[in-house]
Image: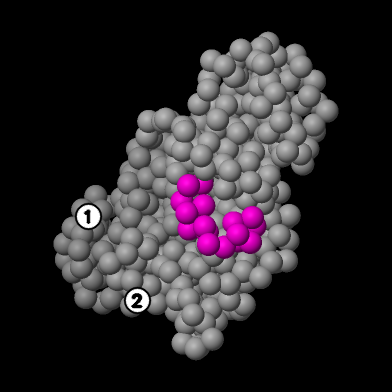
Amino acid sequence: MINIRTLSAAVACAALTGMAYASLLPQCPDNDYGCIIAVIHEYSEGAGLPVADTLYRALDAAGRLNSHELLRYGRVKSLLGNYRAAASIYCRAATGESRLEHAALTQMGHQLADADSAEKAAAVRIFERCALAAPNADTALFRNWLADFCGRQGLFEQEISILTRLHSAESPSDRRLAEAARKHFSNRRYRFAVRAAAAAHDRTADESQKSSDAAFVAYQSYMQLRVRDSALIWLRLSGVAGKDANIQAAALNQETGHLEAAAALIDSLPVSLPKDTLGVRQYLFSGEPANALNFIMMSKSAAWTMAPRERMLWRGRCMIFGGRAYEAIPVLDSLRFMPGWHAASEVLRYKYWVQKLDDDRGALDLWGKLEYAIYTGSLTAAVRLLKGAEITGEPGEMLAVRLAKVLAQANRHAAALEILELAEGGPGYGIKGIDRKSHKHTPGPEYLYLKAEMLSETGKQYEAKVFAQKILTDYPLDVFAQKARILLSKI
Protein backbone atom coordinates (compact mmCIF):
# COMPACT_ATOMS: atom_id res chain seq x y z
CA MET A 1 0.00 0.00 0.00
CA ILE A 2 1.33 3.42 -0.88
CA ASN A 3 2.09 5.63 2.08
CA ILE A 4 0.22 8.90 1.82
CA ARG A 5 3.05 10.69 3.60
CA THR A 6 5.48 9.49 0.93
CA LEU A 7 3.04 10.69 -1.69
CA SER A 8 2.86 14.08 -0.01
CA ALA A 9 6.60 14.58 -0.49
CA ALA A 10 6.37 13.64 -4.15
CA VAL A 11 3.37 15.90 -4.58
CA ALA A 12 5.20 18.79 -3.00
CA CYS A 13 8.08 18.28 -5.40
CA ALA A 14 5.57 18.38 -8.23
CA ALA A 15 4.29 21.77 -6.96
CA LEU A 16 0.83 20.62 -6.02
CA THR A 17 -1.24 23.38 -4.47
CA GLY A 18 -1.77 23.16 -0.74
CA MET A 19 -5.52 23.18 -1.21
CA ALA A 20 -5.44 20.12 -3.48
CA TYR A 21 -3.31 18.12 -1.10
CA ALA A 22 -5.39 19.25 1.89
CA SER A 23 -8.48 17.92 0.12
CA LEU A 24 -6.74 14.61 -0.57
CA LEU A 25 -5.58 13.80 2.96
CA PRO A 26 -8.97 13.68 4.75
CA GLN A 27 -10.57 11.73 1.88
CA CYS A 28 -8.03 8.92 2.15
CA PRO A 29 -7.06 8.76 5.85
CA ASP A 30 -6.02 5.11 5.69
CA ASN A 31 -3.44 5.68 2.99
CA ASP A 32 -5.62 3.65 0.62
CA TYR A 33 -4.19 3.60 -2.93
CA GLY A 34 -7.56 2.91 -4.49
CA CYS A 35 -8.99 5.87 -2.66
CA ILE A 36 -6.20 8.11 -3.92
CA ILE A 37 -6.81 7.01 -7.51
CA ALA A 38 -10.54 7.63 -7.10
CA VAL A 39 -9.82 11.16 -5.93
CA ILE A 40 -7.58 11.75 -8.95
CA HIS A 41 -10.36 10.52 -11.22
CA GLU A 42 -12.65 13.15 -9.73
CA TYR A 43 -10.15 15.83 -10.69
CA SER A 44 -9.77 14.46 -14.24
CA GLU A 45 -12.34 16.75 -15.82
CA GLY A 46 -12.66 20.48 -16.49
CA ALA A 47 -10.98 22.82 -14.05
CA GLY A 48 -9.55 19.95 -12.02
CA LEU A 49 -7.29 18.71 -14.82
CA PRO A 50 -4.13 20.54 -13.62
CA VAL A 51 -4.56 18.96 -10.16
CA ALA A 52 -5.07 15.50 -11.68
CA ASP A 53 -1.99 16.03 -13.83
CA THR A 54 0.14 16.90 -10.79
CA LEU A 55 -1.16 13.98 -8.74
CA TYR A 56 -0.58 11.56 -11.62
CA ARG A 57 2.93 12.94 -12.06
CA ALA A 58 3.66 12.34 -8.39
CA LEU A 59 2.36 8.77 -8.50
CA ASP A 60 4.26 8.13 -11.72
CA ALA A 61 7.50 9.38 -10.14
CA ALA A 62 6.88 6.92 -7.32
CA GLY A 63 6.41 4.10 -9.85
CA ARG A 64 2.81 3.52 -8.80
CA LEU A 65 0.86 3.80 -12.08
CA ASN A 66 -0.27 0.62 -13.80
CA SER A 67 -1.05 0.47 -17.53
CA HIS A 68 -4.72 1.31 -17.06
CA GLU A 69 -3.87 4.43 -15.08
CA LEU A 70 -1.26 5.36 -17.67
CA LEU A 71 -4.10 5.47 -20.21
CA ARG A 72 -6.00 7.87 -17.96
CA TYR A 73 -2.83 9.91 -17.41
CA GLY A 74 -2.34 10.14 -21.17
CA ARG A 75 -5.88 11.43 -21.55
CA VAL A 76 -5.27 14.12 -18.92
CA LYS A 77 -2.08 15.24 -20.69
CA SER A 78 -3.93 15.38 -24.01
CA LEU A 79 -6.81 17.42 -22.60
CA LEU A 80 -4.23 19.88 -21.25
CA GLY A 81 -2.72 20.14 -24.75
CA ASN A 82 0.57 18.43 -23.86
CA TYR A 83 0.38 15.95 -26.73
CA ARG A 84 4.08 15.09 -26.78
CA ALA A 85 4.08 13.98 -23.15
CA ALA A 86 0.82 12.13 -23.80
CA ALA A 87 2.41 10.17 -26.67
CA SER A 88 5.21 9.00 -24.39
CA ILE A 89 2.71 7.93 -21.72
CA TYR A 90 0.51 6.08 -24.23
CA CYS A 91 3.61 4.29 -25.49
CA ARG A 92 4.43 3.03 -22.02
CA ALA A 93 0.86 1.78 -21.64
CA ALA A 94 0.94 0.02 -25.02
CA THR A 95 4.31 -1.62 -24.48
CA GLY A 96 3.78 -2.38 -20.79
CA GLU A 97 0.83 -4.70 -21.31
CA SER A 98 0.26 -6.29 -24.72
CA ARG A 99 -3.50 -6.61 -24.27
CA LEU A 100 -3.73 -2.82 -23.99
CA GLU A 101 -1.91 -2.10 -27.25
CA HIS A 102 -5.04 -1.45 -29.27
CA ALA A 103 -6.72 0.52 -26.47
CA ALA A 104 -3.68 2.79 -26.12
CA LEU A 105 -3.38 3.35 -29.85
CA THR A 106 -7.09 4.00 -30.30
CA GLN A 107 -7.24 6.46 -27.42
CA MET A 108 -4.09 8.26 -28.52
CA GLY A 109 -5.42 8.57 -32.08
CA HIS A 110 -8.67 10.05 -30.81
CA GLN A 111 -6.89 12.58 -28.59
CA LEU A 112 -4.28 13.60 -31.18
CA ALA A 113 -6.98 14.34 -33.75
CA ASP A 114 -7.50 17.72 -32.06
CA ALA A 115 -3.83 18.73 -32.18
CA ASP A 116 -2.30 20.90 -34.90
CA SER A 117 -0.12 19.29 -37.56
CA ALA A 118 3.20 20.15 -35.90
CA GLU A 119 2.10 18.62 -32.58
CA LYS A 120 0.75 15.51 -34.29
CA ALA A 121 4.00 15.02 -36.19
CA ALA A 122 6.11 15.47 -33.05
CA ALA A 123 3.88 13.12 -31.02
CA VAL A 124 4.11 10.43 -33.70
CA ARG A 125 7.91 10.65 -33.67
CA ILE A 126 8.01 10.39 -29.87
CA PHE A 127 5.68 7.38 -29.81
CA GLU A 128 7.65 5.64 -32.58
CA ARG A 129 11.02 6.05 -30.84
CA CYS A 130 9.60 4.88 -27.53
CA ALA A 131 7.63 1.92 -28.87
CA LEU A 132 10.39 0.52 -31.05
CA ALA A 133 12.91 0.75 -28.22
CA ALA A 134 10.74 -1.46 -26.01
CA PRO A 135 11.74 -5.13 -25.65
CA ASN A 136 9.68 -7.48 -27.85
CA ALA A 137 7.81 -4.55 -29.46
CA ASP A 138 5.34 -5.54 -32.17
CA THR A 139 7.06 -3.48 -34.87
CA ALA A 140 4.57 -4.34 -37.61
CA LEU A 141 1.59 -3.37 -35.47
CA PHE A 142 3.03 -0.01 -34.45
CA ARG A 143 4.37 0.72 -37.95
CA ASN A 144 1.06 0.04 -39.64
CA TRP A 145 -0.98 1.97 -37.09
CA LEU A 146 1.30 5.00 -37.16
CA ALA A 147 1.38 5.03 -40.98
CA ASP A 148 -2.41 4.78 -41.17
CA PHE A 149 -2.80 7.56 -38.63
CA CYS A 150 -0.39 9.81 -40.52
CA GLY A 151 -2.25 9.10 -43.77
CA ARG A 152 -5.60 10.02 -42.23
CA GLN A 153 -4.22 13.18 -40.64
CA GLY A 154 -2.45 14.49 -43.74
CA LEU A 155 1.08 13.75 -42.49
CA PHE A 156 2.01 12.16 -45.79
CA GLU A 157 5.77 12.65 -45.49
CA GLN A 158 5.77 10.73 -42.21
CA GLU A 159 3.41 8.08 -43.53
CA ILE A 160 5.79 7.15 -46.34
CA SER A 161 8.88 7.54 -44.15
CA ILE A 162 7.51 5.17 -41.49
CA LEU A 163 6.56 2.49 -44.03
CA THR A 164 9.90 2.86 -45.80
CA ARG A 165 12.17 2.82 -42.73
CA LEU A 166 10.37 0.05 -40.87
CA HIS A 167 10.31 -2.41 -43.75
CA SER A 168 11.95 -5.75 -43.03
CA ALA A 169 12.11 -9.20 -44.55
CA GLU A 170 10.11 -10.58 -41.60
CA SER A 171 7.50 -7.84 -41.87
CA PRO A 172 7.57 -6.30 -45.37
CA SER A 173 5.79 -3.05 -46.08
CA ASP A 174 5.84 -3.08 -49.90
CA ARG A 175 2.14 -3.88 -50.20
CA ARG A 176 1.16 -1.10 -47.81
CA LEU A 177 3.41 1.34 -49.69
CA ALA A 178 1.77 0.29 -52.97
CA GLU A 179 -1.66 0.80 -51.41
CA ALA A 180 -0.58 4.25 -50.15
CA ALA A 181 0.68 5.11 -53.65
CA ARG A 182 -2.66 4.23 -55.22
CA LYS A 183 -4.52 6.27 -52.60
CA HIS A 184 -2.29 9.30 -53.16
CA PHE A 185 -2.73 9.00 -56.92
CA SER A 186 -6.51 8.80 -56.58
CA ASN A 187 -6.44 12.00 -54.53
CA ARG A 188 -4.12 13.74 -57.02
CA ARG A 189 -1.20 13.85 -54.62
CA TYR A 190 1.15 12.82 -57.39
CA ARG A 191 4.47 13.63 -55.69
CA PHE A 192 3.56 11.48 -52.70
CA ALA A 193 2.28 8.78 -55.05
CA VAL A 194 5.65 8.73 -56.83
CA ARG A 195 7.57 8.42 -53.56
CA ALA A 196 5.37 5.66 -52.17
CA ALA A 197 5.32 3.74 -55.47
CA ALA A 198 9.10 3.91 -55.88
CA ALA A 199 9.61 2.74 -52.29
CA ALA A 200 7.16 -0.14 -52.83
CA HIS A 201 8.92 -1.17 -56.02
CA ASP A 202 12.37 -1.10 -54.41
CA ARG A 203 11.21 -3.20 -51.46
CA THR A 204 9.48 -5.94 -53.41
CA ALA A 205 11.57 -9.03 -52.73
CA ASP A 206 10.05 -11.20 -55.48
CA GLU A 207 11.65 -10.13 -58.76
CA SER A 208 8.67 -11.48 -60.69
CA GLN A 209 6.52 -8.91 -58.89
CA LYS A 210 8.81 -5.96 -59.61
CA SER A 211 6.68 -5.04 -62.64
CA SER A 212 3.73 -4.52 -60.34
CA ASP A 213 1.00 -1.95 -60.00
CA ALA A 214 3.41 0.24 -58.05
CA ALA A 215 5.59 0.86 -61.11
CA PHE A 216 2.56 1.71 -63.20
CA VAL A 217 1.30 4.13 -60.53
CA ALA A 218 4.73 5.81 -60.60
CA TYR A 219 4.47 6.09 -64.39
CA GLN A 220 0.99 7.59 -64.20
CA SER A 221 2.05 10.03 -61.47
CA TYR A 222 5.08 11.23 -63.40
CA MET A 223 2.82 11.76 -66.40
CA GLN A 224 0.57 13.98 -64.31
CA LEU A 225 3.63 15.86 -63.06
CA ARG A 226 4.81 16.22 -66.68
CA VAL A 227 8.16 14.61 -65.88
CA ARG A 228 8.32 12.64 -69.10
CA ASP A 229 11.79 11.10 -68.74
CA SER A 230 10.92 9.51 -65.42
CA ALA A 231 7.50 8.45 -66.72
CA LEU A 232 9.16 6.58 -69.58
CA ILE A 233 11.52 4.75 -67.20
CA TRP A 234 8.65 3.63 -64.98
CA LEU A 235 6.53 2.56 -67.93
CA ARG A 236 9.33 0.21 -68.94
CA LEU A 237 9.71 -1.03 -65.37
CA SER A 238 5.98 -1.71 -65.13
CA GLY A 239 6.29 -4.45 -67.72
CA VAL A 240 3.06 -3.38 -69.40
CA ALA A 241 3.09 -4.84 -72.91
CA GLY A 242 0.98 -4.82 -76.05
CA LYS A 243 -0.26 -2.26 -78.54
CA ASP A 244 -1.47 0.29 -75.98
CA ALA A 245 1.82 0.15 -74.08
CA ASN A 246 3.76 0.68 -77.32
CA ILE A 247 1.59 3.68 -78.17
CA GLN A 248 2.24 5.22 -74.76
CA ALA A 249 5.95 4.44 -74.99
CA ALA A 250 6.20 6.00 -78.46
CA ALA A 251 4.49 9.18 -77.27
CA LEU A 252 6.77 9.40 -74.23
CA ASN A 253 9.87 8.83 -76.35
CA GLN A 254 8.79 11.71 -78.57
CA GLU A 255 8.21 14.01 -75.62
CA THR A 256 11.59 13.15 -74.10
CA GLY A 257 13.56 13.58 -77.32
CA HIS A 258 14.16 9.89 -78.06
CA LEU A 259 12.88 10.19 -81.62
CA GLU A 260 14.69 7.15 -83.04
CA ALA A 261 13.20 4.89 -80.38
CA ALA A 262 9.79 6.46 -81.05
CA ALA A 263 10.13 5.82 -84.78
CA ALA A 264 10.91 2.14 -84.19
CA LEU A 265 7.85 1.75 -81.98
CA ILE A 266 5.63 3.55 -84.50
CA ASP A 267 6.82 1.22 -87.26
CA SER A 268 5.86 -1.78 -85.12
CA LEU A 269 2.25 -0.63 -84.79
CA PRO A 270 -0.52 -1.92 -87.05
CA VAL A 271 -2.38 0.52 -89.32
CA SER A 272 -4.53 2.60 -87.02
CA LEU A 273 -5.45 6.15 -86.04
CA PRO A 274 -2.90 6.18 -83.17
CA LYS A 275 -0.16 5.23 -85.64
CA ASP A 276 -1.15 8.07 -87.98
CA THR A 277 -1.30 10.66 -85.19
CA LEU A 278 2.04 9.49 -83.83
CA GLY A 279 3.43 9.97 -87.33
CA VAL A 280 2.25 13.60 -87.32
CA ARG A 281 3.69 14.10 -83.84
CA GLN A 282 7.02 12.69 -84.99
CA TYR A 283 7.38 15.58 -87.43
CA LEU A 284 6.21 18.13 -84.86
CA PHE A 285 8.69 16.98 -82.24
CA SER A 286 11.39 17.01 -84.91
CA GLY A 287 10.69 20.71 -85.49
CA GLU A 288 9.00 20.25 -88.87
CA PRO A 289 5.42 21.56 -88.67
CA ALA A 290 5.25 22.04 -92.47
CA ASN A 291 6.15 18.38 -93.05
CA ALA A 292 3.65 17.35 -90.39
CA LEU A 293 0.91 19.17 -92.32
CA ASN A 294 2.09 17.64 -95.60
CA PHE A 295 2.03 14.18 -94.01
CA ILE A 296 -1.65 14.66 -93.16
CA MET A 297 -2.58 16.04 -96.57
CA MET A 298 -0.79 13.31 -98.53
CA SER A 299 -1.70 10.32 -96.40
CA LYS A 300 -3.94 7.66 -97.95
CA SER A 301 -4.41 5.85 -94.67
CA ALA A 302 -7.83 4.24 -94.18
CA ALA A 303 -7.65 5.25 -90.51
CA TRP A 304 -7.66 8.95 -91.46
CA THR A 305 -10.60 8.34 -93.79
CA MET A 306 -12.56 6.71 -90.99
CA ALA A 307 -11.82 9.57 -88.59
CA PRO A 308 -12.23 12.82 -90.60
CA ARG A 309 -12.78 14.92 -87.49
CA GLU A 310 -9.42 13.90 -86.02
CA ARG A 311 -7.72 14.51 -89.34
CA MET A 312 -9.15 18.04 -89.59
CA LEU A 313 -8.15 18.72 -85.98
CA TRP A 314 -4.54 17.82 -86.76
CA ARG A 315 -4.62 19.94 -89.91
CA GLY A 316 -5.76 22.93 -87.88
CA ARG A 317 -3.11 22.35 -85.22
CA CYS A 318 -0.31 22.06 -87.71
CA MET A 319 -1.43 25.23 -89.52
CA ILE A 320 -1.42 27.18 -86.27
CA PHE A 321 1.96 25.76 -85.25
CA GLY A 322 3.35 26.57 -88.68
CA GLY A 323 2.31 30.24 -88.65
CA ARG A 324 -0.84 29.86 -90.76
CA ALA A 325 -3.45 30.65 -88.09
CA TYR A 326 -5.78 32.55 -90.48
CA GLU A 327 -5.90 29.52 -92.80
CA ALA A 328 -6.62 27.23 -89.86
CA ILE A 329 -9.92 28.90 -88.96
CA PRO A 330 -11.96 27.57 -91.93
CA VAL A 331 -10.62 24.11 -91.14
CA LEU A 332 -11.59 24.40 -87.47
CA ASP A 333 -14.96 25.91 -88.38
CA SER A 334 -15.73 22.84 -90.48
CA LEU A 335 -15.49 20.58 -87.43
CA ARG A 336 -18.69 19.25 -85.95
CA PHE A 337 -18.23 18.23 -82.37
CA MET A 338 -20.15 17.63 -79.20
CA PRO A 339 -19.17 19.40 -75.96
CA GLY A 340 -17.86 16.09 -74.60
CA TRP A 341 -15.34 15.66 -77.44
CA HIS A 342 -11.78 15.49 -76.10
CA ALA A 343 -10.63 18.45 -78.24
CA ALA A 344 -13.69 20.70 -77.83
CA SER A 345 -12.07 23.15 -75.40
CA GLU A 346 -8.87 23.21 -77.43
CA VAL A 347 -10.68 24.13 -80.66
CA LEU A 348 -12.70 26.82 -78.90
CA ARG A 349 -9.48 28.22 -77.44
CA TYR A 350 -7.91 28.43 -80.90
CA LYS A 351 -10.95 30.25 -82.28
CA TYR A 352 -10.97 32.67 -79.38
CA TRP A 353 -7.32 33.57 -79.82
CA VAL A 354 -7.60 34.17 -83.55
CA GLN A 355 -10.62 36.38 -82.97
CA LYS A 356 -8.90 38.37 -80.20
CA LEU A 357 -5.67 38.86 -82.18
CA ASP A 358 -7.33 39.41 -85.54
CA ASP A 359 -6.04 42.99 -85.81
CA ASP A 360 -2.48 42.22 -84.73
CA ARG A 361 -0.79 39.90 -87.21
CA GLY A 362 2.52 40.01 -85.35
CA ALA A 363 0.91 38.93 -82.09
CA LEU A 364 -1.03 36.21 -83.89
CA ASP A 365 2.13 34.76 -85.44
CA LEU A 366 3.84 34.91 -82.06
CA TRP A 367 0.90 33.10 -80.47
CA GLY A 368 1.12 30.26 -83.02
CA LYS A 369 4.82 29.78 -82.25
CA LEU A 370 4.08 29.88 -78.53
CA GLU A 371 1.39 27.20 -78.85
CA TYR A 372 3.83 25.04 -80.79
CA ALA A 373 6.50 25.37 -78.10
CA ILE A 374 3.97 24.58 -75.37
CA TYR A 375 2.66 21.54 -77.25
CA THR A 376 6.13 20.05 -77.62
CA GLY A 377 7.02 20.85 -74.01
CA SER A 378 9.79 23.26 -75.03
CA LEU A 379 9.12 25.67 -72.18
CA THR A 380 12.63 27.13 -72.14
CA ALA A 381 12.26 27.95 -75.83
CA ALA A 382 8.83 29.44 -75.12
CA VAL A 383 10.33 31.72 -72.46
CA ARG A 384 13.05 32.85 -74.88
CA LEU A 385 10.38 33.46 -77.52
CA LEU A 386 8.42 35.91 -75.37
CA LYS A 387 11.54 37.53 -73.94
CA GLY A 388 12.66 38.30 -77.46
CA ALA A 389 9.36 39.91 -78.39
CA GLU A 390 7.92 43.26 -77.35
CA ILE A 391 4.65 42.22 -75.75
CA THR A 392 2.46 45.14 -74.73
CA GLY A 393 -1.20 45.94 -74.23
CA GLU A 394 -3.90 43.31 -74.13
CA PRO A 395 -2.18 40.91 -76.60
CA GLY A 396 0.99 41.05 -74.51
CA GLU A 397 -0.92 40.35 -71.33
CA MET A 398 -2.76 37.42 -72.94
CA LEU A 399 0.47 35.83 -74.17
CA ALA A 400 2.15 36.34 -70.80
CA VAL A 401 -0.76 34.75 -68.93
CA ARG A 402 -0.91 31.81 -71.37
CA LEU A 403 2.74 30.89 -70.84
CA ALA A 404 2.82 31.75 -67.13
CA LYS A 405 -0.01 29.31 -66.43
CA VAL A 406 1.87 26.51 -68.17
CA LEU A 407 5.08 27.37 -66.30
CA ALA A 408 3.17 27.39 -63.02
CA GLN A 409 1.81 23.91 -63.74
CA ALA A 410 5.43 22.80 -64.18
CA ASN A 411 6.32 24.41 -60.81
CA ARG A 412 8.52 26.99 -62.51
CA HIS A 413 7.08 29.84 -60.48
CA ALA A 414 10.01 32.24 -60.76
CA ALA A 415 10.01 31.91 -64.56
CA ALA A 416 6.22 32.42 -64.62
CA LEU A 417 6.58 35.61 -62.56
CA GLU A 418 9.32 36.88 -64.86
CA ILE A 419 7.11 36.35 -67.92
CA LEU A 420 4.19 38.15 -66.27
CA GLU A 421 6.44 41.10 -65.54
CA LEU A 422 7.38 41.32 -69.22
CA ALA A 423 3.90 42.67 -69.89
CA GLU A 424 4.27 46.47 -70.14
CA GLY A 425 7.83 46.07 -68.91
CA GLY A 426 8.16 45.66 -65.20
CA PRO A 427 7.10 44.47 -61.73
CA GLY A 428 4.89 47.52 -61.18
CA TYR A 429 2.54 46.62 -64.03
CA GLY A 430 -0.82 45.85 -62.55
CA ILE A 431 -0.54 48.20 -59.59
CA LYS A 432 1.71 51.19 -60.16
CA GLY A 433 1.66 50.78 -63.90
CA ILE A 434 -2.07 51.36 -64.33
CA ASP A 435 -1.70 54.83 -62.87
CA ARG A 436 0.82 55.90 -65.47
CA LYS A 437 -0.50 57.79 -68.46
CA SER A 438 1.89 55.88 -70.71
CA HIS A 439 -0.01 52.67 -70.03
CA LYS A 440 -3.17 52.49 -72.08
CA HIS A 441 -4.20 49.00 -70.98
CA THR A 442 -5.62 48.15 -67.56
CA PRO A 443 -4.63 44.65 -66.36
CA GLY A 444 -7.45 42.14 -66.13
CA PRO A 445 -8.40 40.08 -63.07
CA GLU A 446 -6.82 36.85 -64.33
CA TYR A 447 -3.48 38.58 -64.84
CA LEU A 448 -3.66 40.16 -61.37
CA TYR A 449 -4.58 36.87 -59.72
CA LEU A 450 -1.89 34.86 -61.48
CA LYS A 451 0.71 37.45 -60.59
CA ALA A 452 -0.43 37.43 -56.94
CA GLU A 453 -0.21 33.66 -56.89
CA MET A 454 3.30 33.59 -58.40
CA LEU A 455 4.48 36.29 -56.01
CA SER A 456 3.22 34.17 -53.12
CA GLU A 457 4.88 31.04 -54.50
CA THR A 458 8.22 32.86 -54.74
CA GLY A 459 8.04 34.13 -51.15
CA LYS A 460 6.97 37.71 -51.88
CA GLN A 461 3.97 37.67 -49.60
CA TYR A 462 3.52 41.42 -49.14
CA GLU A 463 3.47 42.06 -52.89
CA ALA A 464 1.12 39.11 -53.35
CA LYS A 465 -1.35 40.67 -50.89
CA VAL A 466 -1.25 43.98 -52.75
CA PHE A 467 -2.16 42.35 -56.07
CA ALA A 468 -4.82 40.09 -54.54
CA GLN A 469 -6.45 43.03 -52.78
CA LYS A 470 -6.41 44.99 -56.05
CA ILE A 471 -8.69 42.35 -57.56
CA LEU A 472 -11.17 42.74 -54.70
CA THR A 473 -11.16 46.50 -55.24
CA ASP A 474 -11.38 46.63 -59.04
CA TYR A 475 -13.20 43.36 -59.85
CA PRO A 476 -15.25 42.45 -56.75
CA LEU A 477 -17.79 40.33 -58.67
CA ASP A 478 -15.34 38.49 -60.90
CA VAL A 479 -14.63 34.78 -60.38
CA PHE A 480 -10.99 35.67 -59.69
CA ALA A 481 -12.12 37.82 -56.75
CA GLN A 482 -13.22 34.67 -54.94
CA LYS A 483 -9.92 33.01 -55.76
CA ALA A 484 -8.12 36.09 -54.47
CA ARG A 485 -9.99 35.81 -51.15
CA ILE A 486 -8.88 32.19 -50.80
CA LEU A 487 -5.30 33.16 -51.63
CA LEU A 488 -5.34 35.97 -49.06
CA SER A 489 -6.56 33.55 -46.39
CA LYS A 490 -3.49 31.38 -47.01
CA ILE A 491 -0.90 34.16 -46.99
Count the marks: how many? Answer: 2
Disc 2 marks which residue?
474
Q: Residues within 10 Å of mark 1 (few under 14, many from 20)?
A: some
55 sits to left or right of 408: left
Q: Amino acid at mark 1?
A: His
* Foreground residue among 87 and 11: 87
Quadrant (top left, top right, bottom left, bottom right) of the C terminus: bottom left
Q: Residue at x 37, y 52 (%)?
A: 112
Q: Earlier in the sequence, mark 2 or mark 1?
A: 1
Magenta: main secondary structure equals helix
114 sits to left or right of 188: left
Whether 436 is drawn above or below 334: the answer is: below
Whether 409 is drawn above or below 160: the answer is: below
Residue 323 visible? The answer is yes
467 sits to left or right of 158: left
The image position of residue 29, as x and y in percent, is: 19, 61
Q: Amino acid at mark 2?
A: Asp
| Range of residues picked out in magenta | 349-366
Whether 20 is drawn above or below 235: the answer is: below
Which colour style is shown?
one colour
Residue 98 visible? The answer is no
Closer to the observer: label 2 or label 1? Answer: 2
Whether 334 is drawn above or below 301: the answer is: below
Q: Residue at x 64, y 38 (%)?
A: 318
10 in magenta:
no
Q: Are marks 2 and 1 in contact (CB under 8 Å)?
A: no
Disc 1 marks which residue?
41
Q: Residue at x 52, y 59 (%)?
A: 357
* Foreground residue among 355 and 426: 355
